Amino acid sequence: MKYTLSVLVENRPGVLSRVVSLFSRRGYNIDSLAVGATENPGVSRMTIVGQGDNYILEQVEKQLNKIVPVIKVRSLGADAVRAELMLVRIGCDTQSFGEINQIAALMKAEVASVSRHSVTLKFAGDPEKCDTLFDLVRPFGVKEVTRTGVIALEQG
């Protein structure tokens, strides 16, 4: 099962390293990790997506709570609001540009850059929709892709 953790931490050097090493020491993989400032400049939010059963999730939460710079750990449910940013550069010529532009419009992606031999799309939305857009443009020849990782907030 996939889980998403929202971890509030003190914004100071070494905290990210300590959190990541906790996962590494226990042999747990991180599927996605996004870190950014919150409304409080002294606090950062880590959004961590991983895989494991309820036991693993419980252990990870307990261990994270033991790290001193960690302020709060919360497991987010299926109703949380999730988003991801993706940039994808696709090889294209004048014929395929029209098709790629139609796909971008259909998916509500933005054309971020156009050159003679490629087009770069920018998309922000559900991680599953990022996957869908990527699958739709893959036949045109993806030259490069980067994704931010999932960010999430609990509803309410």
Image (spheres, rainbow, N blue to C red):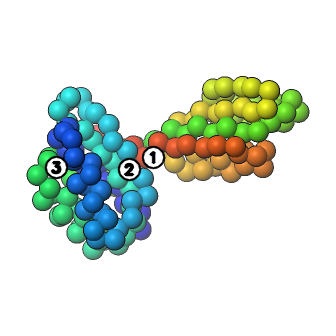
Amino acid tagged 2:
Leu
Question: Which residue lies under the disc numbered 1?
Answer: 149
What is the quadrant of residue 22 in the picture? Answer: bottom left
What is the quadrant of residue 64 in the picture? Answer: bottom left
Q: Are marks 2 and 1 in contact (CB under 8 Å)?
A: yes
- Residue 88 at what x, y percent from top left? 63, 39
Question: Which residue lies under the disc numbered 3?
Answer: 70
What is the quadrant of residue 77 in the picture? Answer: bottom left
Mark 1 lies on a secondary structure that is loop
Q: Is residue 84 above or below residue 53?
A: above
Residue 136 in sight from this viewpoint: no
Q: Residues within 10 Å of mark 2 (few under 14, many from 20)?
A: some
Horizontal relation, residue 13 to residue 66: left or right:
right
> Tag 1 or tag 3, which sits nearer the N-term?
3
Residue lying at 25% horizontally and 55% vertically, measured from the top left: 19
Mark 3 lies on a secondary structure that is strand
Q: Are marks 3 and 1 in contact (CB under 8 Å)?
A: no
Amino acid tagged 3:
Val
Horizontal relation, residue 107 to residue 93: left or right:
left
Question: Which residue lies under the disc numbered 2?
Answer: 33
- Residue 43 at what x, y percent from top left? 20, 36
Mark 2 lies on a secondary structure that is strand
Q: Residues within 10 Å of mark 3 (few under 14, many from 20)?
A: many
Q: CA distance from mark 3 to mark 2?
A: 16 Å
> Tag 1 or tag 2, which sits nearer the N-term?
2
Horizontal relation, residue 103 to residue 78: left or right:
right
Residue lying at 47% horizontally and 42% vertically, measured from the top left: 148
Amino acid tagged 1:
Gly
Q: Is residue 17 above or below residue 117?
A: below
Q: Are marks 3 and 2 in contact (CB under 8 Å)?
A: no
Residue 141 in sight from this viewpoint: yes
